[in-house]
Image (cartoon, rainbow, N blue to C red):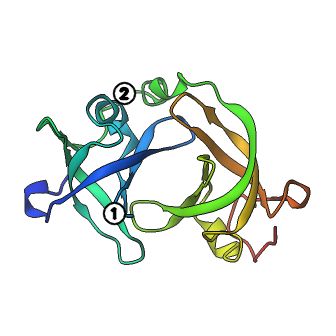
Amino acid sequence: MHWINPDSLVPVTCEVKRFLFNSRGEADGLILTNGAAAHFPPHLSEEVLAHVGPGDRVTLYGVRPRSAELIACVAIDTPEGVRIDDRGPPPAKTKKDRDGPRAKVKTLRLEARGTVERLLHGPKGEIRGVLLEEGEIVRFPRHVADALPDLLAAGEELAVRGIGVKTHLATVIEATELGRSTHALKRIPSKPKARFHG
């Protein structure tokens, strides 16, 4: 949303509790101490991680979807007064240019199981993952939430298998299978289909 003037938006100031990451290891969101979440585009990952840390008090400028307690950030003011402004992704002349920086983190086959702490949302408020109480971040396509509403809720037990990254900052799994236990994993369909059970 680089076309929006951040100064036209109502600022929200709060402390950062933790970062959220995508399955390429890029930061793309924050959990705030007031219980809300913030989303920012992953092309801002390096800049945000260089200027913001857990416990920092930041001011966020963004829009709020109707369906989630979320701020889709247009800009972030850091504690030192640095404005991180989303002016869109850097221009890429070739596919290699676009994908090159994202190839730095080695992807692994990963699995996890635990209790869902909270749902994670995309910038329009759509459910795009969960945070487990043990700290793992699970990501999946938007159609999965419609297919598994009983499984994807805070307090539910969840097992997951997929491809992702494990770094000193986070473990993130792009789910290919979900279920209530490792013995009941069901493959996620690549496209929206009729309801499937885990």
Give the vertical position of 105 relative to 70 (above or below).
Answer: above
Quarter of the image where the C terminus is located: bottom right
Badge 2 density bin: few <14, some 14–19, many ≥20, Cα 10 Å: few
Element class at badge 1: loop
Q: Give percent across and percent down for residue 72.
A: 32, 59
Q: Is residue 198 left or right of residue 21?
A: right
> In the rendered image, which residue does mark 2 sit on?
93
- Measured along the vertical axis of the image, is residue 71 above or below residue 102? below
Q: What residue type is labelled 1?
A: Asn
Q: Residue 175 at x, y = what percent?
A: 69, 51
Rounded to the nearest angstrom, the CA distance separating label 2 from label 1 is: 41 Å
Which residue in the protein does label 1 denote?
34
Disc with the residue nearer the chain's start (2 vs 1): 1
Query: In terms of image quadrants, where is residue 48?
Result: top left
Q: In which quarter of the image is the N terminus?
A: bottom left
Image coords of residue 29 (percent x, y): 40, 49
Of badges 2 and 1, the one in the foreground is: 1
Amino acid type, mark 2 = Lys
Residue at (71% x, 55% y) in the render: 114
| Residue at 71% across, 31% down | 108
Residue 164 visible within the image: yes
